[in-house]
Amino acid sequence: MTLMASDTSADVVIVGTGVVGCLVAERALDAGLSVLMLEAGPRVDRWRIVENYRNLPPSMRLFHWDAPYPPKPWAPHLETRVAKESEQYLQLEGPNARAYLQGYVRYAGGATWHWAGICWRLTPEDMRLKSLYGVGRDWPFGHDVLEPYYTAAEYAIGVCGPSDPALQWPPNAERSKPYPMGPIPFGPGEKRLTEAAARIGMMNLPAPQARNSGVSYHGRPPCCGNNNCFPVCPIAAKYDAATALPKIEAKGGKILANAVVYRVETGEKNAVEAVHYFDPNKVSHRVTAKLFVIACNGIETPKLLLLSKDDRNPNGVANSSDQVGRNMMDQPKLFAEVELAEPLWTGVGPVQSSSILNTTQGEFRNRYAGAMFRMENFARSPLGSAAALKKGLVGKALDTEIRRLSACTARLTVEHEPLPLPINRLTLSSKTDWLGINKPNIYYDVSDYVRRSAKEYTVPRLQQLASELGATSFQLSPEFLNSDHIMGGCIMGSEAATAVVDADCRAHDHQNLFLPGGGAMPSGTASNSTLTMAALALKAADAITAQLKHG
């Protein structure tokens, strides 16, 4: 009989309670292993986040989605971007530093609270960039190995998507099973976008989403189209911490919030023996396990490994390759605010429900990045109201202009494929947080691979798409921005000399340490990373249970 986890020991200790940590925890518990999860931030109820959001001033609701998640002193995060520069948590430098100003919160459940829910798969070509196009890295296994884990992840988190293989991605590919639920219907704006895109050879596909479409699934209600997927789904139709964490506890898992892990301890044989965390009173605690999983995110995980350097691991834990913190990736984003001659009416349904992905594939990838195009489907009335007020209008003229701008404006977005570049690197800043822990410092350059794509390919295509929609004005963002898809800092590969983890996300340097998730991804591609992170979590979980149950 398996013993229950305590506050100080378990078979498996998982640092981080986002989607990756939750999926590993469930698999381990189902295999009869005891699980203890450690979370730096607080645990929070949905109603509190909703109330926080409701009570924000309008300007904060519009431009600071993370404000409903105020950070605790011991767990600072990117909400502090609104504070003085000296108080910023993430330190940034490099030619395109703004493109790595990530949005994440350190709360129990992590980004599951505020993600858009989009669940695209990679294509076989996305996993063979080096072989096919001479750039980037190849994955140490093929798409056929990942496909069953994609399917398992879709069922584990509850993904809705189209049944027509021609509307799936990759198109007409073999799938183990259909999606658990059918797709969410397009709103009027997305229907218009689909028609306009088709006229210029761009295929707008219904996005698979981890939200319920017309049915209940895993105890969650159907999506009712609140159009408020971030900062939080107010009714729990989307996969998030409110349903994931209680399920783990019901299976016997233990979750310890407000536990800031700051050190990974190794022993004489270089196996991991313990992790150390601070509580909110700055008291240190030591937690032991047979096996450890670091599943913070692609920034916090490499930060922790670098913080943990010791005599055996002078460059940091799991870092004999010097690749921990290198190859930081996100999809550099540009967007265009467009005004249209006729009403488009975005805002019906989820904030994102479709994407153009045929623009991510092609032989051009040997020179410049592929890219995903989409229209943001959020309601435009708050932005329209703000813009109309700036014009100094009053009375009926103000009302008419608010209505026009709400109906006849849109945001078109393009997210570019990044390459894993060693110069894009996380290091430890000399600046420290409230607990005295070094803040993360990131150097970031989007690279000529992305700049060539923007100049030769994506911006002209974005202008063409806007024109086809009937745009009368087109205002392009002046610099590359972040997409909040954090990848690459603990990169995967078959050779210990050039990678941090192996094909199962096991650290090359430590047999009982796993680092699954976005940090392990060898290629960033142009599509959302969460489903691939979830698939890697389940693949790692199988390796973890096999290692502990069978030796």
Image (cartoon, rainbow, N blue to C red):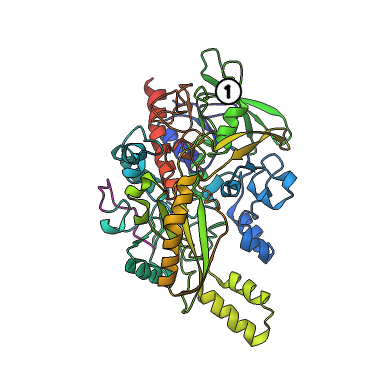
Nearer to us in this view, 364 or 246: 364
* Relative image position of residue 241 (x, y in whole percent): 53, 47
Q: Is residue 294 above or below residue 270?
A: below
State whether residue 491 is above or below residue 160: above
In which quadrant of the rendered view does residue 58 lie?
bottom right
Quadrant holding the N terminus: top left
Q: Main secondary structure of the magenta part?
A: loop
Residue beneath disc 1: 315
Residue for point 44% across, 48% down? 417
Where 545 falls versus 87 (above or below)? Answer: above
Residue 296 position within the rendered picture, expressed as x and y whole percent measured from the top left: 55, 38
SS state under label 1: loop
Q: Is residue 263 left or right of residue 127?
A: right
Residue 181, given in percent of the width and then of the height, sits at 35, 56
Residue 315 falls left or right of residue 123? right
Residue type (three-letter) at the residue carrying disc 1:
Asn
Quick check: is 62 in the magenta stretch? no
Question: Is residue 182 inside the magenta stretch?
Answer: yes
Q: How would you rate the neighbour count of disc 1 (Cα within 10 Å): few for under 14, some for 14-19, many for 20 or more?
A: some
- Confirm whether residue 477 shows in the render: yes
Q: Which residues are magenta?
A: 172-184
Inspect this view and state whether residue 222 appears. no
